[in-house]
């Protein structure tokens, strides 16, 4: 899996500097140059353990942010959030993120989207 190329634009925001394409098991996901991500939405208290811009998972977080933005724009479509979370987990594993950590990230994303949009 190719990694995204980002440049910092604010304290907690990064901009995609070139178009990015990810071929998931669900299809091709294309993210346009200029997309802005905040990295992983991790509570600040946990940043010392899981920094939101860690190179280990920033590519997966960028793809997840893009898919969640589209789900939000599509009338907060819960099925699209579910899809985004599945792709996020797949990306984490392709990036060789520890299976336990990837599962924890996935479970928290699923729980958040379930509570907020279901």
Image: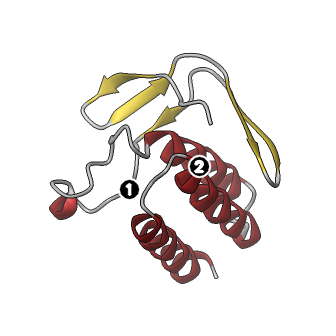
Q: Is residue 19 left or right of residue 93?
A: right
Relative image position of residue 63 (x, y in whole percent): 59, 44
* Residue 117 image label: none
Identify the residue at image location x=39%, y=66%. Answer: 101
Disc 1 marks which residue? 41
Identify which residue, 97 or 62, lies in the foreground.
97
Q: Secondary structure at mark 1?
A: loop
In the rendered image, which quarter contains the N terminus?
top right
Residue visible at 49% across and 76% down in the picture: 107
At x 50% / y 69%, what residue is drawn?
A: 109
Q: Is residue 110 left or right of residue 48?
A: right
Q: Nearer the viewer, residue 63 or 24?
A: 24
> For this view, does 69 lie left or right of residue 105?
right
Helix, strand or loop status at disc 2: helix
x and y, in percent, of residue 16 in the image: 52, 24
According to the picture, the residue beneath numbered tag 2 turns out to be 94
Q: Quadrant of the C terminus?
A: bottom right
Q: Identify the residue shown where x is 59% and y is 49%.
A: 94
Q: Position of residue 29 (x, y in %)?
A: 75, 40
Give the class, few, some or many, for how many residues have Cα within 10 Å of label 1's Cα (few <14, many ≥20). some
Q: Residue furthest top?
A: 18
Rendered view: 69 above or below 4: below
Q: Nearer the viewer, residue 33 or 96?
A: 96
């Amino acid at each position: 899996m190719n990694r995204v190329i980002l440049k910092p634009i604010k304290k907690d925001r990064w901009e995609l500097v070139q178009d990015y394409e990810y071929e998931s098991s669900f299809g091709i996901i294309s993210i346009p140059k200029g997309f802005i991500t905040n990295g992983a939405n991790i509570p600040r208290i946990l940043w010392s353990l899981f920094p939101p811009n860690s190179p280990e998972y920033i590519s997966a977080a960028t793809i997840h942010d893009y898919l969640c933005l589209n789900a939000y724009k599509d009338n907060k479509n819960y099925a699209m959030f579910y899809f985004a979370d599945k792709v996020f987990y797949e990306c984490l594993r392709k990036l060789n993120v520890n299976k336990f950590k990837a599962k924890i990230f996935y479970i928290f994303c699923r729980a958040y989207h379930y509570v907020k949009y279901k």
